[in-house]
């Protein structure tokens, strides 16, 4: 085959879409590899891009001040959760058995802790919860309640020096008639005066000097009888004690609580100021 002149080769190069400057550049791939002939359809060799080096994450250093038991507990907790999740998703006999075995181990460990904690409490009074507050032993509870009742009785007797109990009733109310003897005995035993107030003007056995309602029941919003209020006449301060039939122990407890600074702080809006007769 006759060799084609150079201008014709350049024209052919342009015809197939080679870059105009590619043929004239000494660094052109074609002129360097002219021995390979025409290779118009070969893909250009991709240039290698420098890949950033990936550094390994720093290895966590153990905390010198951390107790190894914490690591053991966290491992046990995570393992138990993993075994449970596997058993829930795939409840085969082996998976369930493996989870139950580890759970039984955890329960035994917790039971051992509870046993040691009880022994420590027995030997350390300040850590024994049964020695604080209301006892759980029947005999101790009896002693505790008797001491509490005596203390509350003394509190009510001190209140009786400048406080009275307002007892609102109706003559046609059977609960008021049942409650009247309780209040009468409470007045005699604990030394606080009970002032009976009749809402309908009727009499009530045990309280012959009952007063007629002069509008105080409306001011206190008494909508149900029997009703009992603790009042301090010279200040006009009056606080509800309760509605319905109450026992002597309930009266003692409620009066002692509402008269204490702690009880007043818990419900400051319960007390009211009225012009008492």
Image (cartoon, rainbow, N blue to C red):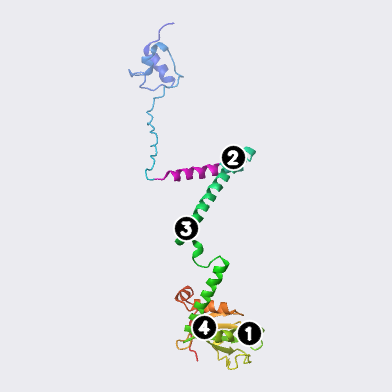
Say if mark 3 contacts mark 4, CB within 8 Å. Answer: no
Given residues 147 and 157, the one toward you in this image is 147
Question: What label sits on residue 176 in the rendered view?
Answer: 1
Say if mark 3 contacts mark 2, CB within 8 Å. Answer: no
Q: Please tell me how crowded label 1 is: few (under 14), some (14-19), or many (20+) other residues with Cα within 10 Å.
A: many
Residue ID for mark 3 = 123
Residue 201 in picture, x, y percent from top left: 62, 92
Residue 3 in picture, x, y percent from top left: 40, 7
Residue interval drawn in magenta:
66-82
**Mark pair 2, 1: CA separation:** 67 Å
Q: Quadrant of the N terminus?
A: top left
Residue ID for mark 2 = 98
Q: Is residue 241 magenta?
A: no
Question: What label sits on residue 230 in the rendered view?
Answer: 4
Image position of 172 (left or right of 187): right
**Mark pair 3, 1: CA separation:** 52 Å
* Residue 222 seen in this snapshot: no
Badge nearest the viewer, 3 or 2: 3
Q: Earlier in the sequence, mark 1 or mark 4?
A: 1
Q: Is residue 261 above or below residue 54?
A: below
Q: Residue at x 51, y 78 (%)?
A: 150
């Amino acid at each position: 085959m006759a060799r084609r002149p150079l201008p014709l080769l350049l024209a052919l190069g342009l015809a197939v879409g080679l870059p105009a400057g590619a043929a004239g550049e000494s660094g052109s791939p074609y002129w360097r590899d002219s021995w390979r002939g025409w290779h118009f359809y070969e893909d250009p060799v991709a240039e290698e891009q420098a890949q950033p080096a990936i550094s390994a994450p720093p290895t966590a250093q153990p905390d010198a001040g951390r107790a190894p038991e914490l690591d053991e507990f966290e491992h046990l907790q995570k393992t138990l959760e993993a075994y449970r999740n596997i058993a829930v998703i795939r409840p085969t006999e082996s998976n369930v058995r493996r989870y139950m075995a580890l759970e039984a181990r955890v329960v035994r460990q917790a039971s051992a802790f509870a046993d040691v904690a009880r022994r420590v409490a027995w030997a350390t009074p300040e850590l024994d919860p049964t020695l604080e507050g209301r006892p759980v032993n029947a005999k101790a509870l009896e002693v505790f309640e008797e001491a509490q009742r005596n203390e509350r009785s003394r509190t009510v007797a001190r209140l009786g020096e400048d406080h009275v109990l307002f007892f609102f009733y109706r003559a046609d109310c059977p609960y008021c008639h049942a409650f009247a003897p309780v209040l009468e005995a409470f007045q005699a035993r604990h030394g606080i005066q009970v002032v009976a107030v009749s809402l309908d003007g009727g009499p009530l056995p045990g309280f012959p000097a009952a007063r007629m309602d002069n509008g105080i029941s409306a001011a206190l919003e008494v909508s149900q009888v029997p009703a009992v209020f603790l009042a301090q006449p010279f200040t006009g301060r009056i606080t509800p004690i309760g509605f319905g039939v109450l026992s002597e122990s309930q009266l003692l407890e409620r009066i002692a609580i509402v008269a204490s600074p702690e009880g007043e702080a818990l419900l400051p809006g319960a007390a009211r100021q009225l012009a008492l007769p």
